[in-house]
Image (cartoon, grey):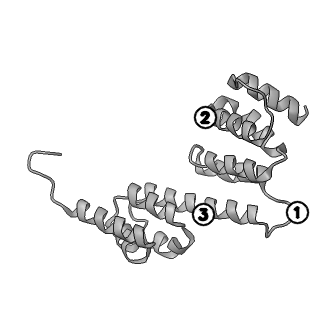
């Protein structure tokens, strides 16, 4: 099946209302399909063959929040630049995979402070803030309060203060 035929099939499955004139239309279609798990096999095929690798990469990275950790690398491989291992696309994908791995670590392991301390410099500002919002670990928050970006340090200190605040009597 050609890429155009696969796009038409996906558009019909999603109920996409308009023509697929350019990458903006395909991006909207892909985001609509991303939110319907049953369409992921067709979405994967369209992304793999899309002529705009930057746009396809953006969609793939947006899927990382929706798939189990063990599936992320397979999604990344759909758009990985096989011609140049050092491409900006590959660096972008690898960084986002690392950030999601660290976020998973913090979310799933209350004793993750050592892993976070070792890898905090690999995580961008946005993910540092996501870690602050998700973790309940005083150790992780202390690391971010000391070594995170300036806004992250502030948010981590505030979250630590809130977590250390005694709960009012009579509440759980």
Q: Assign a secondary structure to mark 1.
A: loop
Q: Position of residue 87 (x, y in %)?
A: 79, 66
Q: Assign a secondary structure to mark 3.
A: helix
- Residue 44 against residue 82 in the figure, above or below: above
Residue located 39% across and 73% down the image:
143
Q: Position of residue 164 (x, y in %)?
A: 21, 63
Q: Which residue is mark 2?
A: 35
Mark in front: 3 vs 1 = 1
Q: Give the crowd class for mark 3: few <14, some 14-19, many >=20 residues within 10 Å.
A: some
- Residue 170 against residue 105 in the figure, above or below: above
Asked if the residues shown at circle 1 and circle 2 are in contact, with their CB atoms under 8 angstroms apart, the answer is no
Q: Position of residue 156 (x, y in %)?
A: 35, 66
How many numbered discs sit on the rendered protein?
Answer: 3
Specify whether 68 is left or right of 49.
Answer: left
Q: Which residue is mark 1?
A: 83
Q: Give the crowd class for mark 2: few <14, some 14-19, many >=20 residues within 10 Å.
A: few
Specify whether 81 is left or right of 143.
Answer: right
Specify whether 10 is left or right of 111.
Answer: right
Q: Position of residue 116 (x, y in %)?
A: 47, 69
Chain-order first, disc 3 or disc 1: 1
- Residue 169 against residue 86 in the figure, above or below: above
Q: Give the crowd class for mark 1: few <14, some 14-19, many >=20 residues within 10 Å.
A: few
Structural distance between the alpha carbons of marks 2 and 3: 23 Å
Chain-order first, disc 1 or disc 2: 2
Residue located 36% across and 72% down the image:
145
Residue located 70% across and 37% down the image:
30
Structural distance between the alpha carbons of marks 3 and 1: 22 Å
């Amino acid at each position: 099946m050609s890429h155009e035929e696969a796009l038409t099939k996906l558009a019909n499955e999603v109920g996409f209302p308009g023509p697929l004139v350019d990458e903006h239309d395909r991006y909207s279609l892909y985001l609509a399909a991303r939110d319907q798990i049953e369409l992921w096999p067709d979405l994967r095929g369209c992304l793999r063959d899309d002529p705009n690798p930057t746009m396809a990469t953006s969609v793939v990275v947006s899927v990382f929040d929706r798939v189990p950790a063990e599936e992320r690398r397979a999604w990344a491989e759909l758009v990985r630049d096989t011609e140049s291992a050092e491409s900006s696309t590959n660096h972008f994908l690898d960084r986002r995979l690392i950030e999601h791995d660290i976020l998973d670590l913090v979310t799933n392991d209350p004793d993750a402070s050592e892993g976070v301390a070792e890898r905090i410099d690999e995580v961008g500002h946005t993910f540092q803030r996501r870690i602050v919002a998700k973790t309940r670990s005083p150790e992780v928050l202390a690391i971010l309060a000391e070594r995170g970006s300036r806004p992250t340090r502030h948010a981590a200190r505030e979250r630590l203060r809130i977590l250390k605040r005694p709960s009012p009597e009579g509440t759980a």
